[in-house]
Image (spheres, rainbow, N blue to C red):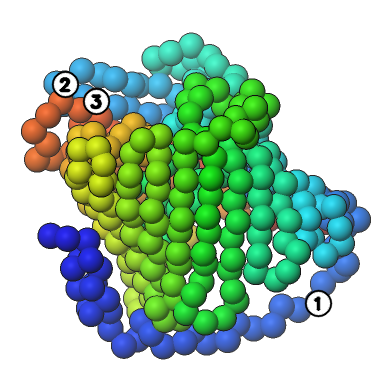
Amino acid sequence: MTVIVVLLAVLAAVPVWAQTPAPPSAQASEGPPPPAIRRWIDLQHVHLSSRYRWVEASDGRLMSSTVQWQPQVRARLLFDRDKKYSLHVGAFSGSQFISGWNNTGGGVGVFTGDFNIKQLFVSAQPVAGLDLQIGGLYMLRGESTEVTTYDNDAYIVGQRASWRPSEGRLAEVSATAGYIGDFREPNVFERLHRLTEWNYGQVLVGVRLGPRVRLSVDYTHEAGREILRQGLSVRMPATVPLLTTVRLEAYERLDPEPAQGFNVMADLRPHPRVGVTLGVTSIDRRYGPLNADRYEVGTRFYSIGSLALTRDVSIGWFQGHAFNTAYPIPNQRRFELLLTINPTATLKRHGIF
């Protein structure tokens, strides 16, 4: 089964209602003027999470049974009133490339308090649609996710140019050149000297196949590996009950040791406060370890869920179970129970940021 055939089959199966335009959103009512600090600082995301994580290997060994915590802050410093030039900052917990959590000392492991600026880059948008970046960058995934690309905690140092037109079939063209490595050095200030080194390159193209359907394709050179990736997402209209989004992503490693894998997932909304994701993924034995540590390699079923208790507080879970995997893996079964406090919207609503 080639990836192109799979993508074409999915596109052919997308019903007519997936192509109908979404109804126009109601115009936001005018509110109080923004706080003065918003002229200089755009707080994009701030949250604090805790989770219990349990992991069992395929040989029955207990790999993890611990309580962890995770602070995250993303913001940008604005140099001009039009927000065309800015300095982006991302500070997170975790001690390495695929780790964004610290141990509390409850269960396996001792307390850790890692908190580093992992991303720090300058962004310039001299004309509408063009974005130029240099520094410690986030990974670019297109319509794919951390399952088949890179862990959400990943980082690189380099340069990126992106063109994102607001209309037409073409949604994005991005080119990235930089350095991927220093996997146990999350602090960006200890990695910025890599700006003159290159072992990573990516070209990504995103396409609007319809008002609710998007496709991305990218070629990545990653420290000697050559990888093609594709991602397809279909957003359902409000008239469709329960199902909100379907996503299909795949990859082909061209060199070395050619192989391929996929991830299929569906987002469900059984209640306004409840979100559920169900998925099946198959990652070849030698693809890791830079994709998400929840999945790593092997074939597995997984589910993710969240329940909003209040506007700022939610609880959730992750559950994964590998099957039909003929080689040893460290995460045959995995379960997480999470608590997240995310006051970002409240801080903005009250004019604090």
Residue 36 in the image, given as x and y percentages of width and height: 91, 56
Q: Which mark is residue 30?
A: 1
Residue plotted at (66% across, 60% down): 131
Residue 290 in the image, given as x and y percentages of width and height: 38, 35
Q: CA distance from mark 3 to mark 1?
A: 53 Å
| Apparent side of residue 19 relative to residue 250 in the rendered image (left or right) | right
Q: Which residue is mark 3?
A: 330
Residue 200 in the image, given as x and y percentages of width and height: 47, 40
What SS does tag 3 mark? loop
What SS does tag 1 mark? loop
Q: Which residue is mark 2?
A: 60
The earlier-in-sequence mark between 3 and 1 is: 1
Q: Residues within 10 Å of mark 3 (few under 14, many from 20)?
A: some
> Of circles 3 and 2, which is in front?
3
Residue plotted at (69% across, 82% down): 27
Q: Residue furthest top?
A: 110
Residue 330 in the image, given as x and y percentages of width and height: 24, 25
Q: CA distance from mark 2 to mark 1?
A: 58 Å
Question: Looking at the figure, which quarter contains the N terminus?
Answer: bottom left
Residue plotted at (55% across, 22% down): 185
Residue plotted at (41% across, 29% down): 52
Residue 72 in view, yes or no: no
Amino acid carrying label 1: it is: Glu
Amino acid carrying label 2: it is: Gly
Q: Nearer the viewer, residue 271 or 33?
A: 33
Q: CA distance from mark 3 to mark 2?
A: 9 Å
Q: Residues within 10 Å of mark 2 (few under 14, many from 20)?
A: few
